[in-house]
Amino acid sequence: MPELPEVEQYRQLLADHGLNRRIVGVDAEDAWYLKRGLTAADARSALIGASLVSARRRGKLLLADLETTPAGGPGPVPRAVGLHFGMSGRLLVDGRSAIDRLLYAPAATAERWDRFVVRFDDGGDLRMHDPRRLGGVELDPAEARLGPDALRATLPEVRAALAGAAVALKARLLDQARLAGVGNLVADELLWRSALAPQRPAGGLDDDEVRRLHRGLGATLRMLIRRGGSHTGDLMAARRPGGRCPRDGAPLRRSTVGGRTTWWCPAHQL
């Protein structure tokens, strides 16, 4: 599933191969895939004749900035396309993919799963390929509804995200309005590495534990990006019935925290 490490790879793919190419067509036949009032006509009006000029990411949201100059207008008008990948979305540029296979997504590909296509004047294209149809596309997304990006979050930002919260620690980490980018697999790996139990009250961590969590957050995300995705963590292979902690060999426990299946070690995650 695309979490922050996968979306960071999509961002790099877009930055390397999708920028500064004039858009001449938009295929947006799946109205459900267009979010927050966006229509196919709106998408064509905003994108055709423009170029994507930068690739950004906030949490699991990929942002492609574009500039277009309205007829008779005073100059370029900055706009952004927001790409959400859900559980099975992949970004392809000219057939290139930063991710060959996603966990929980079909291994096969089919053209009918191309939910949104941007066509360039050089004959290439950008595609949102999403078998499970859980992602989406929007224009000018409200970035402020997301919390600080987890990869760049400062210690004060992490402390503020947890402060006073009675909800479970993992549930707070998954709250994209508090901290953007942590998904289920990343959260389990992070808490396992940080030796923190997922069901603890988020606001109950002491200062040393918050510091440990903050250090672990950046280190875990950088490691997963380097390895190629959120499914590459050291805990991943053991997240199954009968799995044992890779650190101390204790039987892992399976729980439901924040509505998500959670694997953790009761021996060292306290």
Image: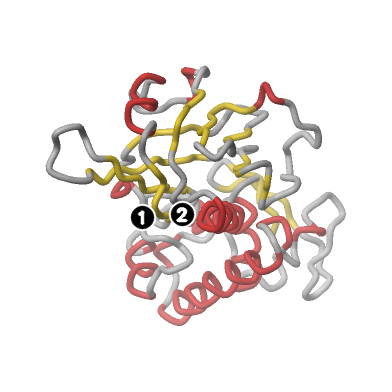
Residue that mark 1 sits on? 147
User: In x, y percent, where is residue 226?
Assistant: 66, 69
* Residue 4 visible at all: no
Residue 231 lies in quadrant:
bottom right
Residue that mark 2 sits on? 59
Label 1 or label 2, whichever lies nearer to me, is: 2
Farthest-out residue, bottom: 208
Q: Considering the numbered disc 2 on the image, is that residue within a helix, a strand or a loop?
A: loop
Label 1 amino acid?
Gly
Crowding at label 2, few (<14), some or many (≥20) Cα neighbours within 10 Å? many
User: In x, y percent, where is residue 220?
Assistant: 60, 70
Which residue is at 47% across, 27% downward? 26
- Are the residues tagged 1 and 2 within 8 Å (C-beta)? yes
Which residue is at 72% across, 64% downward? 233
Label 2 amino acid?
Gly
Crowding at label 1, few (<14), some or many (≥20) Cα neighbours within 10 Å? many
Which residue is at 40% across, 68% downward? 153
The C terminus is located in which quarter? bottom right
